[in-house]
Each structure stands twice: as C-alpha cells, then as structure tokens.
C-alpha cells in the first residue's frame, strides 16, 4: 500500500484567514506580531508563510476578505430594496452589525468599527500598497452608493442632480458610524444616528429642478 506523500494540512485556509483578519481588526497592524498570528491561526511560521506570505501579505489579504464581507452583507441590502429610505437604513444597520461584530442588537460584542477605517489609515501613511487598497475600497463604496442614488433619482425618490453629492455623504455617514462605534458609542445611539442621517439623505424626495 502506497502512503500519501507529505503531511496533510492541519488547518483550513479560510478559517485561518478569518482569525488573522479578526486579530488585525482588533489590535491594528503594528501591534499584531507574527507570534500572535501563529497563535490565532494555530499554524507554525513556515506553514503561515507558505499559505499566506509575510505579515504584510497576510494583512492585505485580510483587508480583501473584510471588503468581501462588506460587499456581501451591505451591498446586497442596499441594492435589494426598491425604496431608498429602507435600503439606506438596512445598509447602515448592516454596517453596524460588522462594526459591532454581531447581528444581535443586544450583544455586548466589542465595537471594532470598520477594519479599513480603524486599521488601514495608520498603515497607509507609509505604505503605498495599503494606501492603494484603501483608495480602492473607498472608491468602490463611492461607486456603489452613487449607483444606488442614481437609481433613486431616476425613480423620483430624490431631486434631480443630487445623486452624486448624496452618495458621497452616505459614504461619510458610514465612516462616521465606524469611528463612533470604535469610540464606544452604543449600538442604540448609532442606530438613531443612522436613521436621522437617512432622513436627511432622502429629504426633498419628489422635488424637481425648476419646479
């Protein structure tokens, strides 16, 4: 009987990357060591390097994974609701679920905020690769919310010519929710802030230029 060559993998790559992402998200890039990454992933350094590369490579992959989570959980509700007010409210609430690392409104899970906003900003100041990824993430958010606002404009839900500015403000509200969550604001307070922001963003519905 022929034995299989080599040792079977003792880890799941997706699970390991999720653990690394959570660690970077909680501690930030600078405070996270390779020893920390080995501990949370259950992998030895050679295996970690072989699977993901060095610390910088693991971090950029973690950012990519986080953006995928944002796209799946937030993009779906934003584009899936025909009525703008409901779409934006669900979008911001989905963002808060990520910021609080829980969908349970009563959960006491730590307020992590947005991983990109909370961790990438400090790294981007001296790292072009991370800076470019951060620009890309923000640009894709701008594009997503801009497209949703253009749909709302075409449906007469917001005034003509206001899609671009309102989309940019919506992205700014999302960033503000992240910063406030990281600062310790309660989920209840941030949901109220989100609802009030949505009311401002959809204000003037039905108005037309020259009308």
Image: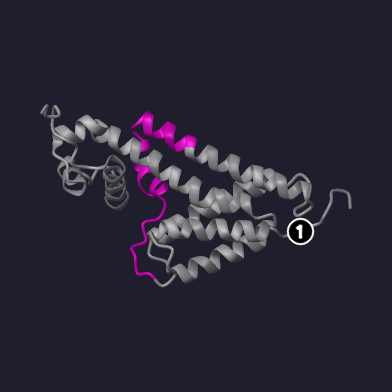
Task: Please provide the residue range marked out in magenta.
Answer: 107-136
Q: Position of residue 151 (x, y in %)?
A: 71, 46
Depth check: 143 or 71 in front?
A: 71
Residue 144 in which image quadrant: top right
Residue 64 in which image quadrant: top left
Q: Residue at x 72, y 60 (%)?
A: 203
Task: Look at the image and say whether residue 174 sits in the magenta stretch.
Answer: no
Residue under label 1: 204
Depth check: 181 or 66 in front?
A: 66
Question: For the view shown, which residue lies furthest in the right direction?
Answer: 211
- Residue 41 located left or right of residue 67: left
- Residue 170 located left or right of residue 39: right
**Residue 52, placed above or below residue 101:** above
Task: Look at the image and say whether residue 114 sits in the magenta stretch.
Answer: yes
Q: Position of residue 189 (x, y in %)?
A: 49, 70
- The way the protein has been coloured in the rendering is one colour
- Residue 14 located left or right of residue 196: left
- Residue 3 located left or right of residue 196: left
């Amino acid at each position: 009987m022929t034995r299989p060559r080599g040792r079977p993998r003792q880890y799941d790559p997706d699970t390991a990357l999720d653990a690394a992402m959570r660690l970077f998200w909680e501690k930030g890039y600078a405070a996270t060591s390779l020893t920390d990454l080995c501990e949370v992933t259950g992998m030895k350094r050679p295996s970690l390097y072989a699977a993901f590369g060095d610390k910088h490579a693991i971090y950029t992959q973690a950012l990519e994974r986080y953006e995928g989570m944002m796209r799946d959980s937030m993009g779906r509700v934003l584009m899936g609701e025909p009525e703008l007010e409901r779409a934006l409210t669900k979008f911001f609430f989905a963002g808060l679920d990520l910021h609080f690392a829980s969908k349970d409104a009563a959960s006491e899970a730590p307020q992590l905020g947005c991983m990109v906003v909370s961790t990438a900003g400090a790294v981007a100041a001296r790292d072009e690769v991370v800076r470019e990824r951060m620009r890309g993430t923000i640009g894709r958010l701008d594009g997503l919310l801009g497209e949703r606002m253009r749909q709302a404009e075409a449906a007469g839900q917001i005034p003509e010519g206001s899609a671009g500015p309102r989309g940019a403000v919506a992205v700014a509200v999302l960033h503000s929710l992240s910063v406030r969550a990281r600062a310790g604001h309660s989920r209840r307070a941030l949901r109220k802030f989100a609802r009030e922001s949505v009311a401002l963003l959809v204000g003037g519905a039905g108005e037309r230029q020259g009308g």
